[in-house]
Every structure is written in structure tokens, then in C-alpha cells.
Image: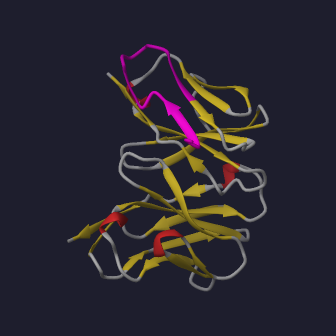
């Protein structure tokens, strides 16, 4: 079984300060983990992915995430927030090497707000 | 050069009506999906199609029926619409062997009155 928990439903930071969006997962299998971003009134876009290679993965727009197996976490970070980062972020877990989309589990989302 | 497109963007209709949402992708992907996103932003997969074959069907009422005329299209038909069907519906596609790398359409906001 798999599950994913996004620990904060809403995060607000000032422009130029670091961003931390927290995600914990549970998986009976070897997990693959992803972050998707959804800007207002838009579809989701893949931000970055971990698929059992390097534990620190870099994505688009300066975001990165670190897979920590001992903590079952995959937190998303960015050193300096930009106004354009305001969006909803989804942490996603799936089973590595498994082809069924039914094994893709989306978190409940974290809304990131940026203060000027 | 839109990758995944959906029509219409907004759909307002009355209970009991039948409606369809169209989806097209020009990425050459072989798997397409329909998702439902509720008012709390919770995203749930409804269907996926691979090479014109339905491969998963989550616990979705049979009022919902996906139809794929070809690999580039996956339409969603909904019969006897109910208030609870109000949501944003997203179409997505993924390349062979990479189901996690999904490309989403802009969504269709369905409001049932």
C-alpha cells in the first residue's frame, strides 16, 4: 500500500526567502516520488522526479527535493521565492517500475503564497 | 503547438443532462488519463487508456464513460449529471513506460445546477 501526506495545506513566505514544502510518504514498495505544480486555472506540470537514482533531485524554476528514506520524506525546497512561484503544489508517490497508473497517489496539495 | 488540449474550458449544465468533454494530445503519447479535482483540490484518477484499451477504472459511477476514437483522443461522456459531479476535470497523457511523467491539459470546470 502507498500513501502520501503533505504536512501543510498552506505556506506563506516573503519574496526572496526560502521555501519549504513538506511531504511524507508511506510505501510497501520501492517508491518513485514527484512534485507537480498547478498555477491558478491551469493544469498540473511536472516539477521534478525521484526514481531511485540520485537522492537530491533538481527541477525546473530553481526547485529541488531530497529523498530521505530514513525519514520517509521528500520535501520540496527553493532558496529564494519569487512571486511567480505562487501556486498549488502536489507531492505524488508511485511504485517504481510498475506500469499501472492506479498506483499513482496524489497528495492533498499545499498552497504556496508569496508576500511582496 | 498545444500539447494537451481540452474543450470546453467551462461547462454549466442542469442535473439530469448528458454532456461530453473532449481531449486531444499531440505528443505522440500512448497513454491518456482523466482526473477529477474536487473543490478541495483533491485529485483522483478516473480512467486511463493505453492503445485504445481501458486499463484501469477506479470506482467511478458507470454514468461516466471514456471513449477513445484513436491514440490522440480520449473523450469523457457523462450521463444523467448530478450535483456531485461538479468539479474540474483534467485530461493527461504520458509517454511509453513513464506513467509518472504526465502532461496535463488546462482542465474543464463542470458546474451542475
Q: Position of residue A85 (x, y in %)?
A: 37, 66
Do we see residue B110 in this rendering? yes
Considering every residue shown, the one lying at the far bottom of the view is A70
Along the line of sight, the residue nearer the viewer: A81 or A34 = A81
**Count of picture labels:** 0
Along the line of sight, the residue nearer the viewer: B89 or A95 = B89
Placement of A72 over or under B81, stated as above or below: below
Considering every residue shown, the one lying at the far front of the view is B1
Along the line of sight, the residue nearer the viewer: B105 or A8 = B105
Q: Position of residue A112 (x, y in %)?
A: 34, 65
Quarter of the image for residue A82 reads bottom left
Do we see residue A9 in this rendering? no
Placement of B25 over or under A61, stated as above or below: above
Q: Position of residue B49 (x, y in %)?
A: 72, 37
Location of the N terminus of chain A by quadrant is bottom right
Residue drawn at point x = 53 percent, y = 77 percent: A65
Considering every residue shown, the one lying at the far top of the view is B17
Q: Does residue B113 belong to the magenta stretch?
A: no
Q: Position of residue A41 (x, y in %)?
A: 37, 45
Quarter of the image for residue B14 reads top left
Q: Which residues make up the magenta segment?
A: B1-22
Residue drawn at point x = 67 percent, y = 68 percent: A32
Position of B53 with respect to B67 (left or right) is right
Position of B4 with respect to A14 (left or right) is right
Residue drawn at point x = 47 percent, y = 42 percent: B106
Q: How is the image coloured?
A: secondary structure
Residue drawn at point x = 55 percent, y = 41 percent: B2
Location of the C terminus of chain A by quadrant is bottom left
Amino acid at each position: 500500500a502507498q500513501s502520501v501526506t503533505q504536512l501543510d495545506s498552506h505556506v506563506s513566505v516573503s519574496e526572496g526567502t526560502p521555501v519549504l514544502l513538506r511531504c511524507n510518504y508511506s510505501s510497501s514498495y520501492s517508491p518513485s516520488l514527484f512534485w507537480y505544480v498547478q498555477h491558478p486555472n491551469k493544469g498540473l506540470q511536472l516539477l521534478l522526479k525521484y526514481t531511485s537514482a540520485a537522492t537530491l533531485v533538481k527541477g525546473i524554476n530553481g526547485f529541488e527535493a531530497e529523498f530521505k528514506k530514513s525519514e520517509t520524506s521528500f520535501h520540496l525546497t527553493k532558496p529564494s521565492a519569487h512571486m511567480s512561484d505562487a501556486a498549488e503544489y502536489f507531492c505524488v508517490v508511485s511504485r517504481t517500475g510498475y506500469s499501472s497508473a492506479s498506483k499513482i497517489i496524489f497528495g492533498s496539495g499545499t498552497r504556496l503564497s508569496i508576500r511582496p | 503547438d498545444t500539447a494537451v488540449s481540452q474543450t470546453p474550458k467551462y461547462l454549466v449544465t442542469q442535473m439530469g443532462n448528458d454532456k461530453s468533454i473532449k481531449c486531444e494530445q499531440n505528443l505522440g503519447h500512448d497513454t491518456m488519463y482523466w482526473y477529477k479535482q474536487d473543490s478541495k483540490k483533491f485529485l483522483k484518477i478516473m480512467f486511463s487508456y493505453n492503445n485504445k484499451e481501458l486499463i484501469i477504472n477506479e470506482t467511478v459511477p458507470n454514468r461516466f464513460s471514456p471513449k477513445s476514437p484513436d491514440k490522440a483522443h480520449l473523450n469523457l461522456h457523462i450521463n444523467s449529471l448530478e450535483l456531485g459531479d461538479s468539479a474540474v476535470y483534467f485530461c493527461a497523457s504520458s509517454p511509453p513506460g513513464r506513467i509518472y511523467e504526465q502532461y496535463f491539459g488546462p482542465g474543464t470546470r463542470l458546474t451542475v445546477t
